[in-house]
Image (spheres, coloured by chain):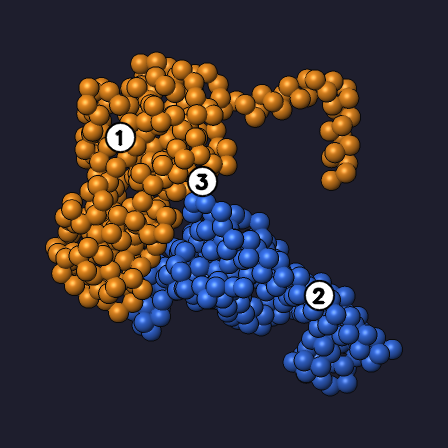
Chain colours: A orange, B blue
């Protein structure tokens, strides 16, 4: 340990502190290079954002890195100073959380996409249809099966799922039978791997796995409208980030998002 | 001071760590004795394999457990079909993950203290007609007790802190697999200031510190007793 530090100091002495610090600085700021953009996107939207950004990269040469996780996780990382330049949120609560702290540029904030909630089962499951409004979810879970959803305390997909189950009056029968996941794609994975017999995810997530299929849909009025907002992160804004945001909200991006099954909302 | 939810999280963590160590300890003593006192072909490989959880990423351990012991896993599916027993999304799975992660720590500590025992004492007992088992139970194990103890405490503390393998293998379920580190992680995802995090952090530190002080005191007492009985 000490030898390592001594060696480092000797090196610094030999090559000059300035050069050493310069190198370290380059390493830390390399994320903010002019021709690259870092996007923090809700896990459910990340694959579509990645696909839409690919054609932006083709046109402009700008590298786009899309980091997908639960909206809540990403929002907390941005609060703590993550170098994201664009944030895509799956629930207004989280983008509002950042807006209250003046961390995003609200003037450029746009509602990008909408989505709907579905009940899924493993492809090999004997269940083909199940009306989520009936009280049959608990029965379909069997003796000790669990319902995979995003963690309803903070993951948007879980928040919507809980709202829908409460509206349909079945929440109490399954509140103790949940397998809450850190993001919605993880909930999908629980079902795809056969660990949980049923799950609630976004309709667009189902395409991510061959191992699951939709067995029921939640009525759109059973939960808040699923709303994906996109906004620049104020601390890391750049011209390329603005250009990417403009591209993602333009008609040019519509076909990509619709191919993934999203409802594309910007009016142009 | 603590909410009922926090008390549930703490008791769950203690229960997971307790069972992890309880099941791990006999196996760890056996493994330590084998590594310290016997020679067999492939010993280096076994030694390496036992230490793997110490060096591979915890998430890899969790994934391996999932593949083996998950509901669809090679062993897990048999356990479920035959006995209706399942680790999936269950605190017993959290205990398994913690036990596997803590195992090498126990083995290391116990093995070192077995190796430190003068083998001539064991040989003398053998020449006087004691069986291998008797030598182990009346000489090796009592003399290795300080190592057993420190290994146990270390493993217990490691089990309380286990995060990666647990969340990968059995997820993060309130009241079932949400132990202290997972609860802190979940609370960190929520907005606003959070006193619950601070309380859980303080409790974690207090438990770990108490365990270390206790083990130090016990091991001193045991060492003194051993010095007293073996001239």
Residue reaching furthest right? B231
Quarter of the image where the C terminus of chain B is located: bottom right
Could you tell which of marks 1 and 3 lies nearer the N-terminus?
3
Query: What residue is drawn where x is 33% and y is 61%?
Result: B71
Q: Chain of mark 1?
A: A
Task: Give the image quarter of residue B202.
Answer: bottom right
Q: Chain of mark 3?
A: A
Query: What residue is drawn where x is 28% and y is 35%?
Result: A228
Q: Is residue B220 left or right of residue A84?
A: right
User: Of circles 1 and 2, which is in front?
Assistant: 1
A177 versus A238 height, above or below: below
Residue pointed to by mark 1: A111
> Which type of secondary structure does the marked residue at label 1 adopt?
strand
Front-lying residue, B36 or B169: B169
Query: What residue is drawn where x is 37% and y is 31%?
Result: A87
Front-lying residue, A122 or A216: A216
**What numbered label is drawn on residue A76?**
3
> Which type of secondary structure does the marked residue at label 2 adopt?
helix
Q: Give the spatial CA distance, label 1 vs label 2.
A: 56 Å
Residue pointed to by mark 2: B213
Q: Give the spatial CA distance, label 1 vs label 3.
A: 20 Å
Q: Position of residue B62 (x, y in %)?
A: 45, 54
Evaluate whether residue B6 shows in this view. Answer: yes
Do badges 1 and 3 share one subunit? yes
Q: Give the spatial CA distance, label 2 vs label 3.
A: 36 Å
Q: Position of residue A162 (x, y in %)?
A: 27, 53
Residue reaching furthest bottom? B129
């Amino acid at each position: 340990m000490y030898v390592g530090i001594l060696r480092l100091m000797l090196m610094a002495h030999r090559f000059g502190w300035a050069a050493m610090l310069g190198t370290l600085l380059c390493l830390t700021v390399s994320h903010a290079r002019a021709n690259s953009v870092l996007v923090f996107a809700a896990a459910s939207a990340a694959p579509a954002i990645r696909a839409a950004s690919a054609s932006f990269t083709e046109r402009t040469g700008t590298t786009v890195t899309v980091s997908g996780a639960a909206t809540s996780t990403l929002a907390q990382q941005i609060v703590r100073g993550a170098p994201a330049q664009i944030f895509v949120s799956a629930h207004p609560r989280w983008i509002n959380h950042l807006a209250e702290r003046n961390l995003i540029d609200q003037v450029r904030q746009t509602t990008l996409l909408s989505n709907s909630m579905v009940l899924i089962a493993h492809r090999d499951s004997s269940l083909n249809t199940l009306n989520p409004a009936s009280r049959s979810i608990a029965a379909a879970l069997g003796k000790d099966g669990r319902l995979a959803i995003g963690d309803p305390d903070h993951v948007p997909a879980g928040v919507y799922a809980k709202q829908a189950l409460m509206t349909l009056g079945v929440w109490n029968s399954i509140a103790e039978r949940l397998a809450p996941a850190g993001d919605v794609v993880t909930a999908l994975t629980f079902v795809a791997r056969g660990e949980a017999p049923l799950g609630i995810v976004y309709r667009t997530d189902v395409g991510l796995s061959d191992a699951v299929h939709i067995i029921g849909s939640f009525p759109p009025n059973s939960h808040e409208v699923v709303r994906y907002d996109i906004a620049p992160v104020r601390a890391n804004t750049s011209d390329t980030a603005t250009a990417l945001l403009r591209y993602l909200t333009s008609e040019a991006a519509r076909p990509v998002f619709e191919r993934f099954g999203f409802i594309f909302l910007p009016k142009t | 001071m603590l909410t009922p939810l926090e008390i549930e999280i703490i008791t769950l963590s203690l229960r997971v760590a307790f069972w992890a160590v309880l099941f791990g300890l006999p196996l760890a003593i056996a493994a330590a004795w084998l590594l310290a006192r016997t020679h067999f072909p492939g010993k280096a490989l076994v030694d390496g394999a036992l230490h793997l959880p110490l060096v591979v990423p915890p998430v890899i351990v969790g994934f391996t457990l999932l593949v083996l012991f998950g509901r669809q896993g090679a062993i897990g599916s048999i356990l479920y079909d035959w006995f209706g027993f399942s680790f999936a999304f269950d605190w017993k799975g959290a205990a398994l993950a913690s036990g596997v992660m803590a195992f090498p720590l126990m083995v290391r500590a116990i093995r070192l203290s077995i190796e430190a025992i003068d083998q001539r004492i064991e040989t003398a007992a053998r020449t006087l007609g004691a069986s291998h088992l008797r030598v182990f139970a009346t000489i090796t194990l009592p003399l290795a007790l300080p190592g057993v103890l420190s290994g146990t405490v270390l493993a217990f503390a490691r089990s309380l802190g286990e995060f990666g393998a647990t969340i990968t293998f059995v997820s993060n379920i309130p009241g079932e697999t949400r132990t202290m580190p997972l609860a802190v992680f979940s609370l960190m995802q929520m907005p606003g200031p959070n006193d619950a995090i601070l309380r859980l952090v303080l409790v974690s530190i207090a438990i770990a510190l108490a365990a270390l002080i206790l083990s130090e005191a016990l091991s001193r007492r045991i060492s003194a007793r051993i010095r007293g009985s073996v001239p």
